[in-house]
Image (tube, rainbow, N blue to C red):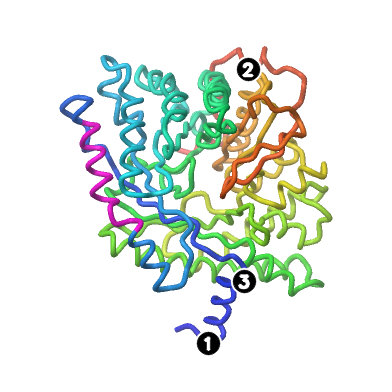
Amino acid sequence: MLSNKEIIETIDMLDNQNLDVRTITLSLSLLDCVGGGAEATCERVYDRIARRAENLVRVGGEIEREYGVPIVNKRVSVTPASLIGASFAAYDKNIYFKLAKTLDKAAKRVGIDFIGGFSALVHKGITEYEDAFLNALPQSIAETDLVCASVNAASTKSGVNMDAVVRLGKTVKELSRLTADRGSIGCAKFVVFANSVEDNPFMAGAYCGIGEGGATVNVGVSGPGVVKAAIEKYKNADLAQLAEVIKRTAFKITRLGQLVCETAAKRLNAGAGVIDLSLAPTPKAGDSVARILEEMGLESVGAHGTTACLALLNDAVKKGGLMAARECGGLSGAFIPVSEDEGMIAAVKRGALTIEKLEAMTCVCSVGLDMVAIPGDTPAETVSAIIADELAIGVVNNKTTAARLIPAHGLKEGAVLEFGGLLGSAPVMPVNRFSPAKFILRGGRIPAPIHSLRN
């Protein structure tokens, strides 16, 4: 039973501290849609999404009104498209483009914000159908509006598939070129993973893993402003005390997410899945992970000590949220996207935050180099090398890491790439000018680390 004080605290979080449910994501398996030819499969995929997700936006709106909780995004994730098209790729070269168009059409039909799952898992090798998928990926994302894509190119058990990484650097560059008239937005809808997870509710990396149920609701809750407001009250607390404050705050945030998850699942006749504990920022003032770290005592994010601050924050959020959720999953931690966090944007503009420091920070938090704009003339081999560095961190540390890089077509270091909305704006960050091309073009596979041998 909630006390009056706790109810008042929650209302204040919602009204004044930007607490929201960042996303309700309905995860749908499409494996049983395959059969009867490519066209018939696409029809069944469309019908499945249109039928199972037809009430998602309405249910989200009802929960918002009944509980007074803002739900920012309503999304769908589906079985990796590379698997859905596998049976047809050998004789239908357009199957993956057709699937992307089908997903986009279905997403627009049900009125959701994004659909994830235009994905492939190539962490150990690339099959013929995955080769066809990778070839189709740039055009498929460039010519759709709501489809998000991801590729898992590394895992702790298999190492880093550098043949895939070489290709994906070129993919990122091609996406930048194909969507140059829209600020290279295609790159913002594509992410490369190490150790991707099957129940992630956040885009662009969400997909429905083959181990998931037929229909499951996964929820991402976010409250950077709430955490910052909580630690503002403890100006003289030591770091252990601050960790306790963050844990208690994360518990309150996550409890709200669990309520929304169970309610949405019941009304959508779906399973109640995971709560993703990630602190996901927005460009709005008062909703920044960077500002939390600065409230902890940094003059600016990027200063020495930033990685240690982030490690404390990430650990405390997980410990507090774990006790409030029936089941935690997804990515669960603190996101540090540059364009989507006004504090990160400010730190880059003042010269305090570099790609190298961001990379160090990804060792202790969720995901990785996220929404990082780099000069448009950055060579594809350098893009691949940045991706490879990030994947290596995930493989060696047995955690999920990723890279969502945006070579800003036609822009140089110091320019600002404007997206608007939740994607914000991204200052174009400098990259190391020395070439990694000879290393990257060796290809092959970086072997799995010794600690992967756990059987």
Q: What amino acid is labelled 1 in the image?
A: Asn
Which residue is depicted at the point 71% across and 41% down?
358
Q: CA distance from mark 2 to mark 3?
A: 48 Å
Which badge, 1 or 3, is on the more N-terminal residue?
1
Q: Residues within 10 Å of mark 1 (few under 14, many from 20)?
A: few
Q: Could you tell whether 51 is left or right of 81 in the image?
A: left
Q: Position of residue 372 (x, y in %)?
A: 65, 37
Q: Position of residue 44 (x, y in %)?
A: 21, 37
Q: What amino acid is labelled 3 in the image?
A: Asn
Q: Position of residue 247 (x, y in %)?
A: 61, 67
Give the mark toward the camera: 2 or 3: 3
Q: CA distance from mark 1 to mark 2?
A: 59 Å
Tell me the residue that label 3 is attached to. Answer: 16
Q: Does 246 sit above or below residue 192?
A: below
Residue lying at the far bottom of the rendered structure: 4
Which residue is depicted at the point 82% across and 45% down?
350
Tell me the residue that label 1 is attached to. Answer: 4
Cβ–Cβ under 8 Å for marks 1 and 2: no
Q: Residues within 10 Å of mark 2 (few under 14, many from 20)?
A: many
Q: CA distance from mark 1 to mark 3?
A: 18 Å
Q: Secondary structure at mark 1?
A: helix
Which residue is depicted at the point 36% across and 35% down?
80
Q: Secondary structure at mark 3?
A: helix
Q: Could you tell whether 88 is left or right of 72 in the image?
A: left
Question: Which mark, by number, is residue 440?
Answer: 2
Which badge, 1 or 2, is on the more N-terminal residue?
1
Instruction: State which region is magenta.
Output: 41-57
Q: Does 200 sit above or below residue 453?
A: below
Q: What amino acid is labelled 2 in the image?
A: Ile
